[in-house]
Image: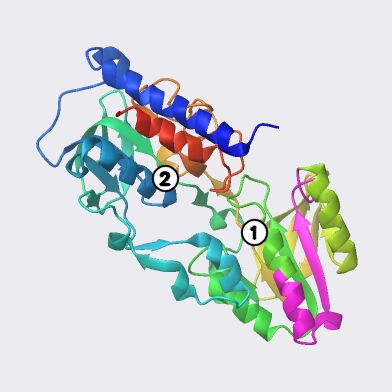
Amino acid sequence: MTPLAAVVSGARVRLFACFLRLGCQQAKPLQLHTGASLAAKNHYEVLVLGGGSGGITMAARMKRKVGAENVAIIEPSERHFYQPIWTLVGAGAKPLASSGRPTASVIPSGVEWIKARVVDLNPDKNCIHTDNDKEISYKYLIIALGIQLDYEKIKGLPEGFAHPKIGSNYSVKTVEKTWKALQDFKEGNAIFTFPNTPVKCAGAPQKIMYLSEAYFRKTGKRSKANIIFNTSLGAIFGVKKYAEALQEIIRERNLTVNYKQNLIEVRADKQEAVFENLDKPGETQVISYEMLHVTPPMSPPDVLKTSPVADAAGWVDVDKDTLQHKRYPNVFGIGDCTNLPTSKTAAAVVALPSQEYLTEQFL
């Protein structure tokens, strides 16, 4: 069997070779969509959209290739969060403060941080527009805008989070409410959901269920808890080997799993959750809860859905081997905002070689 390191290294070489080819083709403006530079601070060799893990990583790599003064990151948030910790925050194992730090502290030194939100992409003119009415042009664009949480697609949310007994590990605003709901649990249904959309870290909705079950056992509440996992999917996991292992855990811990059940409404004042049977559209079931953990529907960021860089579903349309845009050769995408055939998670190893392939263009 070929070692994983060899596979990753080979893909990295291919990714970097692509940027190298583009660098040699600078005399072909139609291919690169390269336009005239704007004034100093309004034009960058490399412009990165998004200050998450992917964007920060790429900015650091690009800095080493073209110089920090030629790279900028557009990111509106004051704080940068390491979101995988939020599963542990929701389970009471870690404090929320441990997951965040000032965005300024993670921006690569010398790289300009443009604290703004992208509101429009114009790849035909090699520029973007921000919410403070600024136009910024680029030679190369890296899109790393992540995935959007759509709580509002569930009737009764997000306003329902103002009530007790309900939380969600996917938002900094609601993750601590999961832990509070666990602590306040007395007896009844503890419900955990999985939506009918792509989600980032698809294992997280199950992780909090297993951690909650362990907490109930530790605190002597397990016999009073009916633990339910309602998932829109038709299986507990997509890979048969792991699905079988998880099914064994589900049996051992006496967990109830209901498939093809999609959360469509939360009546937080009554502590009721409404699910639609995806096999029988229109058929619904109302379940009372003592605790509810919501995994929200997710989608591409709104700014991408109607932009020229999006595919029909709204994701950045990239080549799966190079992360280069299929129509705009000087545009690249990385991470959850792309249409790569992988899970929406940094754990998808295909994202790692793509970073180096991207960087190699500047060698």
> In the rendered view, would you say 279 is above or below 37?
below
Task: Tell me if 264 is positioned left or right of 130 in this view.
Answer: right
Residue extent of the magenta highlight: 211-238
Name the kind of residue labelled 1 in the image: Ala
Position of residue 192 measured from the top left corner of the image (x, y, whole percent): 72, 64
The structure residue drawn at horizontal position 86% and vertical position 82%, both measured from the top left corner, is 223
The mark nearer the N terminus, 2 or 1, is 2
Name the kind of residue labelled 2 in the image: Leu
Task: Tell me if 182 is positioned left or right of 316 in this view.
Answer: right
> In the rendered view, would you say 232 is above or below 185?
above
Quadrant of the drawing holding the N terminus: top right
Does the image show residue 164? no
Quadrant of the drawing holding the C terminus: top left
Q: Which mark is residue 204?
A: 1
Pick whichever, 309 or 26, lies toward us: 26
Task: Tell me if 91 is positioned left or right of 35 in this view.
Answer: right
- Per the model, the C-alpha gap separating discs 2 and 1 is 20 Å
Q: Secondary structure at mark 1?
A: helix
Q: Which residue is disc 2 drawn over? A: 145
The structure residue drawn at horizontal position 43% and vertical position 46%, both measured from the top left corner, is 54
Q: Secondary structure at mark 2?
A: loop
> In the rendered view, would you say 152 is above or below 64?
below
Q: Can you tell which quarter of the image residue 290 is in?
A: bottom right
Q: Residue furthest left?
A: 39
> In the rendered view, would you say 115 is above or below 141?
below
Q: How is the structure coloured here? A: rainbow
Task: Tell me if 236 is positioned left or right of 93 in this view.
Answer: right
The structure residue drawn at horizontal position 15% and vertical position 24%, both measured from the top left corner, is 36
Residue 218 magenta-highlighted = yes
Position of residue 117 measured from the top left corner of the image (x, y, whole percent): 31, 49
